[in-house]
Image (cartoon, helix red, strand yellow):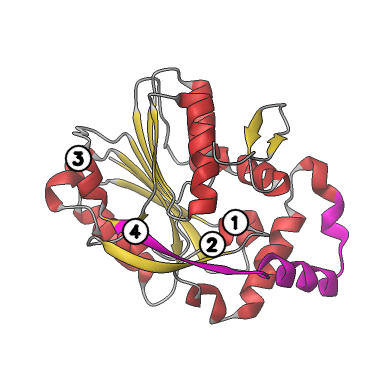
Amino acid sequence: MAKTLKTGKLEDGTELYCLSRTEAIVLDSHVDGYYQHGVAIKDGDTVMDVGANIGIFGVRACQRYPNVKVYAFEPIPDIFEVLQANADKYGKGRFFPMAYGVSETEGSATFTYFPNSPALSTAHGEMWNKDPDMFVNAVKGSLNDAPKGFRWARFLPRFAVRMIANYLRSGAKKFECKLIPISKVIADNNIARIDLLKIDCEGAEILALKSIAASDWDKIQQVVVEIHDTDGRLDFAINLLKEKGFTKINTETEKALEKTNLINVYAVR
């Protein structure tokens, strides 16, 4: 490894590589939220995680199921290095990090990386810039619904929340990152079935869905996708999933994100 990576422990004592232990704990607290409305995986399944960050979803899947396979996408080099380390530690040979973002065609895009809050990193910053208060509301909601070790945060006044929001987005860096269609990864790796496709990629979710070739949709059994519901995105996603044969579709807004336009869509065949 080129440099010594930071480690931290999750609330159950699991030690993993991370960029921010606090953020890792928060991300871990959301893992079970993807398994709602009939969405589930079992041992031997194949999972595709678009917007994997440092790989906590994949780590938990590998811990629970010794024969699961995880393909995890993360384009930003600083985050990908940590993802790779966690994949090697918890799922070497079955946890496959992909150093790409996802789009309809191969290419590249400029991503903004936020060192103080890596999970916010995106190539689509306009999703938050359109309404700066929405980001403050998201931070406030997250503090109100924080994991048990951070319950004190719910009592912070609004001005303090705004200061935290500004801090989280400070020190931004730019990276030019590669983009690849999901279907190319399916073809290159001879993937015959995807039991769960999880998409949480900060504004690129529609491009991710569009990157799946018509011939590959039948391979996908379940989808969980976080939608930034602007410009008809939610309707587009739901209609596309119906068209591709998903018969059980539900939507849910996380309690922490009730004052934002972020909505999770759960689709099961």
Query: Which of the two discs, 1 and 3, labels the residue nearer the N terminus?
Result: 1
Distance, label 3 to label 2, CA atoms, is: 27 Å
Picture coordinates of residue 187 (x, y %)?
17, 41
Name the secondary structure under disc 1: helix
Q: Amino acid at mark 1?
A: Pro
State the extent of the magenta-drawn residues as a range.
152-179
Does the magenta segment cover residue 159? Answer: yes
Could you say which quadrant of the image residue 48 lies in?
Answer: top left
The correct choice, above or below, for 12 with respect to 67 in the image is: below
According to the picture, the residue beneath numbered tag 4 turns out to be 178
The structure residue drawn at horizontal position 61% and vertical position 69%, both measured from the top left corner, is 172
Query: Which of the two discs, 2 and 4, labels the residue nearer the N terminus?
Result: 2
Q: Amino acid at mark 2?
A: Ser
Q: Amino acid at mark 3?
A: Asp
Distance, label 2 to label 4, CA atoms, is: 15 Å
According to the picture, the residue beneath numbered tag 2 turns out to be 121
The correct choice, above or below, for 144 with respect to 88 in the image is: below
Q: Are marks 2 and 1 in contact (CB under 8 Å)?
A: yes
Compare residues 266 and 128 and report the one nearer the observer. Answer: 128
Compare residues 221 and 72 and report the one nearer the observer. Answer: 72
According to the picture, the residue beneath numbered tag 3 turns out to be 188
Distance, label 1 to label 3, CA atoms, is: 29 Å
Q: Residue furthest left?
A: 215
